[in-house]
Amino acid sequence: MNLLLEELDKAYPDATCELNYGNSFELLISVILSAQCTDKRVNIVTEKLFKVADTPEEFCALETDKLEELIRSCGLYKAKAKNIKSCCRDLVDKFGGQVPSTMEELTSLAGVGRKTANVVLSIAFDKPAIAVDTHVFRVAHRLGLSDGNTPDAVERDLCAAFEESEYKSAHFLFIHHGRACCHARNPECDECVVAKFCKYGSGAVNVPAVGQK
Ligand code: SF4
């Protein structure tokens, strides 16, 4: 394993997906809900939500008002409800109600961007993919692994930096490190297990602000 990932793996041996899901469809819905929301909150919401609707067909049949009410506490609930309804319509119309397993097909779904697709590919289908969220973006820059201005550019750099077999671990380890130590503001560099790899303290790294999808 890459030395950097080894150090992170020792620090965060339980780094894995924190969303609760039972199948690829539940994971897809959970990831859509997780935009600008904590995984903990999403899990609280989906515990109730999936008892009301648990298939694309059931979400299509669910009134938008009812769906908005069920997911309100996740934030951005009107946009998320609209995306979920459109996505489920596409799943039924184009994919027989099944979650597809390629990047091209996933990103053809309404409301599904590359980051969401990469999470589903990696976790549900065990394909080599690195989803770049705000934590992964920041940590990759600070560690000098990318100077890309967009999540797509950072994804390309990380894919080049690691072996395919390491992509899933890298994704979760960077997220956990970003949450636990390498905060956006006031990173805890004195406590950091990968400080020796880091370029941030030298002042050579400027993390661009970037919108995440
Ligand atoms: S040394 Fe600081 S900036 Fe660098 S990875 Fe560690 S916590 Fe982040």
Image (cartoon, helix red, strand yellow):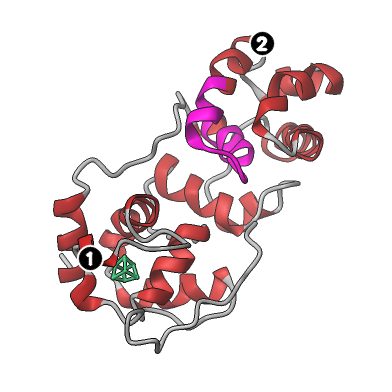
Which mark identifies residue 190? 1
What percent of the width, then of the height, locates residue 167? 33, 60
Question: Is the residue 2 above or below the residue 20 in the image?
Answer: below
Residue located farthest toward the top when viewing the structure as drawn: 51
Magenta region, residue range: 26-44
Q: Quadrant of the C terminus?
A: bottom right
Q: Residue 114 appears in which quarter of the rendering?
A: bottom right
Task: State the SS at label 1.
Answer: helix
* Label 2 vs 1, first from the N-terminus: 2
What percent of the width, then of the height, locates residue 84? 73, 34
Q: From mark 2 to mark 1, how far is it between C-alphas?
A: 47 Å
What percent of the width, then of the height, locates residue 80? 74, 37
What percent of the width, then of the height, locates residue 208? 57, 77
Q: Is residue 9 left or right of residue 100?
A: left
Q: Is residue 13 left or right of residue 63?
A: left
Whether residue 131 appears in this view of the structure is no
Looking at the picture, which amino acid does disc 2 mark? Val
Q: What predominant SS class does the magenta segment belong to?
A: helix
Q: Residue at x 78, y 24 (%)?
A: 68
Q: Disc 2 marks which residue? A: 52
Q: Residue at x 32, y 80 (%)?
A: 201
